[in-house]
Image: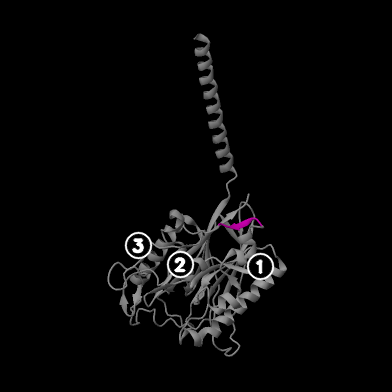
Amino acid sequence: MEPKIVYFAKAISEHNMTKKLLISLIILAAACSTAMAQKQLLVGFYNLENLFDTIDDPHKNDNDFLPSAKNSWNTEKYTNKMNNMAKVIASMNDNKGADVLGMCEVENETVLKDLTVNKQLKKMKYGYVHFEGPDERSIDNALIYQTKKLSVVSASTYPVIFKENPNSKTRDILMVKLMVKKSKATFLVLVNHFPSRLGGETESAPKRNNAASVLRGIYDSLSKADPSLPVIMVGDFNDYPTNESIQKVLNAKGHVNELLVNDLFNAMYELHEQKKGSHFYRGEWGTLDQIILSNNLVNCTGKICYKPASVTIYKQEWMLEQEGKYKGSPLRTFVGAKYLNGYSDHLPVYITVEIKK
């Protein structure tokens, strides 16, 4: 019996050694995996819905957002609005804040300064990019980014000129080239706010087609100059992924398997098919806010890659109406002349991109 006992003991010892070896290998593999883990960035967009200061600018159409206006846009309401916008942005990305956030409906540089130094955002050390634009409502596109992680390589704007009515003014397209500090990888963000549907969807569609044509032209020029440059288009396009401006003029496809070399990928398309949205109108959610990507981001041919299925409409209960017939819709600052002390009529959207080591 003794040999059997010895053999059994030896078997246990070998089993324990094997088990320890396996555990060691698992720990080592996990450590290697952590060491080789890809850096991730959250890149998003948020329509801030009328982020105006309270000061009268004689060169801007800001009459609805002054203390003397019917909405009595005073310091208290401005401070509330700023705190509310900062709360949303700070809570994103597991309370680490968006790394890059394109924005629209920003009046001027002053409101961006006030936003980025707000106590809820100050620790995130946001920088901002903004140019004064020609829009008739005096609202511009802008971008904020975390300066600890990213730096601006270049920035500029592109005007959207309407062929039929060149005197009609709308938002410029903002272009910002960013560099990830540690990896030196670069990518480009184009921030958009296409013309509204005022006057009817069909009647206003040519203006959005015009804006999409300008955006596509910018992308084609950039792609020709540097085919490897990752491009992320964000914005309130005031059209859905299936509308002509997005699907035909911009040529943004909804499914990865449809992509050809020069096609763009609309990350929001699938959510649109699921009838999910960032904007609530007449009882229905819609995906007016979209994120559209260059082919190389989706195919992961460079240093920066789109993380598949990471597109998200950011929604928290406290950002929504809690009662009444609009329960569950975005809680706005105003509904008509009624002050709600809310956030925006849009919800933020974002994707995650991964930076290869």
Position of residue 350 relative to residue 139, above or below, is above
Q: Secondary structure at mark 1?
A: loop
Q: Which residues are magenta?
A: 302-307
Q: Nearer the viewer, residue 172 or 107?
A: 172
Residue 18 visible in the snapshot: yes
Q: Secondary structure at mark 3?
A: helix
Visual colour scheme? one colour
The residue lying at 59 percent from left, 40 percent from top is 32
Q: Nearer the viewer, residue 255 or 129?
A: 255
What separation in Å lies between label 1 and label 3 (alpha carbons)? 39 Å
Give the quadrant of residue 255.
Answer: bottom right
Question: Which residue was labeled with disc 1?
Answer: 260
The amino acid on which the numbered mark 3 sits, given as a three-letter code, is: Glu
**Disc 1 to disc 3: CB gap under 8 Å:** no
Q: Give the tally of numbered discs.
A: 3
The residue lying at 46 percent from left, 85 percent from top is 198
Give the quadrant of residue 53.
Answer: bottom left
The mark found on residue 274 in the picture is 2
Disc 1 packing (10 Å; few <14; some 14–19; many ≥20): few
What separation in Å lies between label 1 and label 2 (alpha carbons)? 24 Å
The amino acid on which the numbered mark 2 sits, given as a three-letter code, is: Gln
Q: Earlier in the sequence, mark 1 or mark 3?
A: 1
In this view, which residue lies farthest toward the top? 2
Question: Which residue was labeled with disc 3?
Answer: 317
